[in-house]
Image (tube, grey):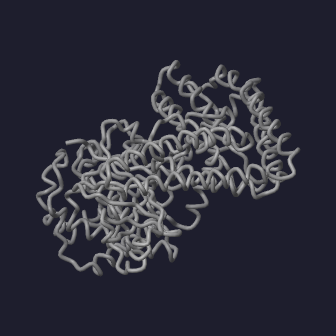
Amino acid sequence: MFKSLLLLTLMTSIQSFGSTEKISSQVMSIELSEKKVMNLYLNKLNTFSKTYCKGGVEEEFWKKYKNFRGNGNFIPLLPDGKLDKSTVNRFIPELEQKKKWIDSQREIVKKRKNFKSEYKKLLELQKEFHSLLLFKKEYFTSSKPQERSLIRNKSKYKLIAFRNDLKKYLESLSFLQSYKFPVDHFDLRVSYDKYKSSEDVVGKRKSNEVYFFRKIVQDGAQDLNHKRSDRFLRATIDSIYLGLNENTDFISEDFRFDLKAALDAIKWHLKGKPKKQFIRLGEWSERVDRAITFYKMLRDGKVEEEGHSFSTDNLLQNRAKGRYILKDYVLSKEADSYKFWMNQSTLMQAIYVIDTILFNEVGGLDGRDALERRDVTQVVINRLTDPEYNSIDPDESIFDYLKLSEKEIAKNPWLNVMFKEGEFSFTYFFIPGNLRIYCPDMTRTGKFLRRENVSIALSLLQKPNVDFRALRYFSRASMLGRVNMAKIWSNFTPVSERPGLKVKRSHYIKGLYKKGKYTFLYDFTDAQGNLFQVLKFKKNIYVTDKQGEHFYKYRNRHYFRYFEHPL
């Protein structure tokens, strides 16, 4: 009865799930109170969890995941499942060169008593960096064209000098560089995306080559306990270095954000003793040496792992079996989840999908304001009426596991949006986040976050943000090498930046603003043409209008950036 009532009250805004029309003022009419809906969902979720996440399920997943991962070494295969021996042969010498390079860096730090000279130069660079930001502030606050032109020229030439100083500095920090520095991570991403779906021998081999090379160069040192990897720092240094060739009059916001993060991380490494770097590089060298031994054995046809010997064929069979077992396990669990929720009301389906996506994609990153979770929820709602996102095709991995007809699947657009292959990475069988699809987080923190997520879902289902048309988003801050997906998603346009919620008590901030006690980071214009300044007051960042009258919280554009189809 409850399901029938909700199906009858679905608004005509979702006229056809094959339509790409904008969602209207309401997605569905909900006649129940938020408390009632909350209790209904939590009870359903509890039943779901007890049914599909019984004791031992998580342990079983991790056991299968460990078998799938093996020793962590990538094994390139051809379309017929056989070893791509030519790719292995090609990259063994590269791995040997990599080990030699790491060992040479160990020799460099071994001779050092400290990193005082590098640390001193870093402080000088940070000072120069701050002075360049002052030019942006002066330029923005000046209203005289001649004065602005003079400021621009000063900034331009100071920035050229700074780039040269930074270039030399990054070149001097060889022990914190990537192997094959500087690595173009964007180019590697584009190249891999081009070939990753190839099924023919030539395309598959090219995919293997690109991925193998990425595994070699996108690597780093770590502590002996396998923590504090500097892989991300090395990749960021690569991208900063390559970006030094870009000519701008002022420091761009992306450059500022990346450089600040990199310099802070470099400073942490320089504060430590060279012996610490020597040990970390030693762990890295040993790790690469183990990889060389593994690939040579793989090439020669006999592999020894943990005291056991395997022929290469047997190893490939075991790896293939481990992959199949994990994939089969996860897809079966996901199919069970799909079938459980397809038999619930449309409202329950919608809340489950939104809650699960928000939990995995955002978590509690956006705090109590929950602005990113609201926007991601709206992205999900926008996808609901787009056939590119609201269907599951026969060639998708989960299709055969569902054991449903295409017509039956088409009746569940909410579930299809979440399980659509290639859209939400946490649904992939090799991403541990898929656990939270069938094993919801029942910790105290998880339950608290879930209540917020349900509240957000109900709010936007009844009153969606019809002006927010985004269909995609990404986080620059979480991308290795700070890859900018905007350059890849050429058929999408970025949604204009927006300030956060208004600061309720802004007297103190306004006082600092009037005294000029702030760092000007950048300015942006929203979709309505309003100009805003992004300012840093001590350790906190705020947004204000052009006049500095109203102050807002800052939404970090590097964490979430949204994209829509052009009209």
Residue 162 placement (x, y as % from top left): 58, 43
Asked if one can make out residue 226 in the rendered structure from this viewpoint, the answer is yes
Asked if one can make out residue 332 in the rendered structure from this viewpoint, the answer is no
- Side of 451 where 413 appears, left or right: left
Above/below status of 240 relative to 528: above
- Side of 46 where 41 appears, left or right: left
- Side of 73 where 253 appears, left or right: left
> Residue visible at 37% across and 36% down?
395
Tell which of 153 and 383 is nearer to you. Answer: 153
Tell which of 53 and 501 is nearer to you. Answer: 501
Q: Quadrant of the N terminus?
A: bottom left
Residue 326 placement (x, y as % from top left): 55, 47
Tell which of 358 and 139 is nearer to you. Answer: 139
> Residue visible at 46% across and 67% down?
364
Residue 23 placement (x, y as % from top left): 18, 55
Residue 267 placement (x, y as % from top left): 69, 56
Quarter residue 88 falls in: top right
> Residue visible at 31% across and 71% down?
550
Q: Quadrant of the C terminus?
A: top left
> Residue visible at 47% across and 66% down?
518
Quarter residue 137 falls in: bottom left
Above/below status of 494 relative to 311: below
- Side of 229 where 202 appears, left or right: left
Tell which of 285 and 246 is nearer to you. Answer: 246
Q: Tally the numbered discs.
A: 0
Above/below status of 92 relative to 443: above
Quarter residue 515 falls in: bottom left
